[in-house]
Image (cartoon, grey):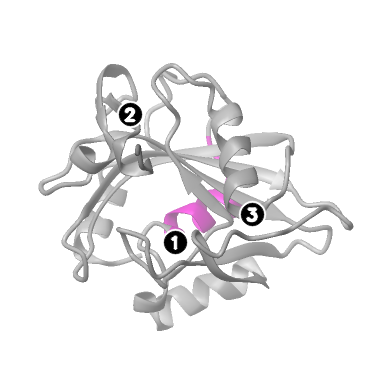
Amino acid sequence: MSTREDHLVELVDDAGQAHGDTTVAEAHQPPGKLHRAFSVVLVNPDGQVLLQRRAAVKTRFPLRWANSCCGHPRPGEALTEAANRRLHEELGTGPVELTEVGVYVYYAEDPTTGRVEFEYDHVLRGEFLPGAPLEPDPDEVAEVRWADPATLETELDRDPRSYAPWLGGVVNRLLRPSGSPSDVPGSTMAPPGSPADDAAERSGGR
């Protein structure tokens, strides 16, 4: 039976240009292979962002708080299509209109599982409307909560080990959007702030 670890992801260069594919499992084995990913942030009318605590069975950074939803587009798949698919799978919600607010490259090693995150991450913002369904899959999500993004930045500095290492960069892109929206894999948009972002991730800083 196929698992998510067997799914294909799109390998990219530092400019986000695709040059092949590999499995999720292989991409996250040390030293890691740079591949395309997305991070969705759902924002409610009060400006709060939806956070999820990753389930204990996750192979990378389990039980850490992260943004609303993360994932990898299949090779050649539009980012918005992939992101809405994962919103439904993880949170039982969507589809929602998504806007790209930035891209950045990060690298992080999970001290618990030994896996590696080395991702060209597209940050996507979506509006969560009152009354929208929200039914997290317990195999994906341990719990959810709403947070003020500015307050969250302070919490990330104070207690970084409670959060996924990519969350700081995601919140930064949300609060300080950069670049033009794009939902087409292979975008030539360069990661804003790289390699500084990459160095911060390597050192565990934010």
Residue at 52 percent of width and 19 percent of height: 184
**Residue 172 among those drawn in magenta:** yes
Left or right: residue 62 compared with residue 25: right
Please state the extent of the stretch shown in magenta in the rendering.
Answer: 167-178
Name the disc covering residue 91, or none. Answer: 3
The quadrant where residue 189 appears: top left
Q: Earlier in the sequence, mark 3 or mark 1?
A: 3
Q: Nearer the viewer, residue 52 or 127?
A: 52
Q: CA distance from mark 3 to mark 2?
A: 22 Å
Instruction: Look at label 1 and name its amino acid.
Output: Gly
Label 1 to label 2, Cα distance in Å?
A: 26 Å
State which mark lies toward you, 1 or 2. 2
Q: Position of residue 168 (x, y in %)?
A: 44, 61
| Label located before the other in sequence (1 or 2) | 2
Query: Which image quarter is the N terminus in?
Result: top left
Q: Which residue is mark 1?
A: 168
Q: Callout 3, which amino acid?
A: Leu
Can you tell which quarter of the image residue 105 is in?
top left
Read off the residue under disc 2.
8
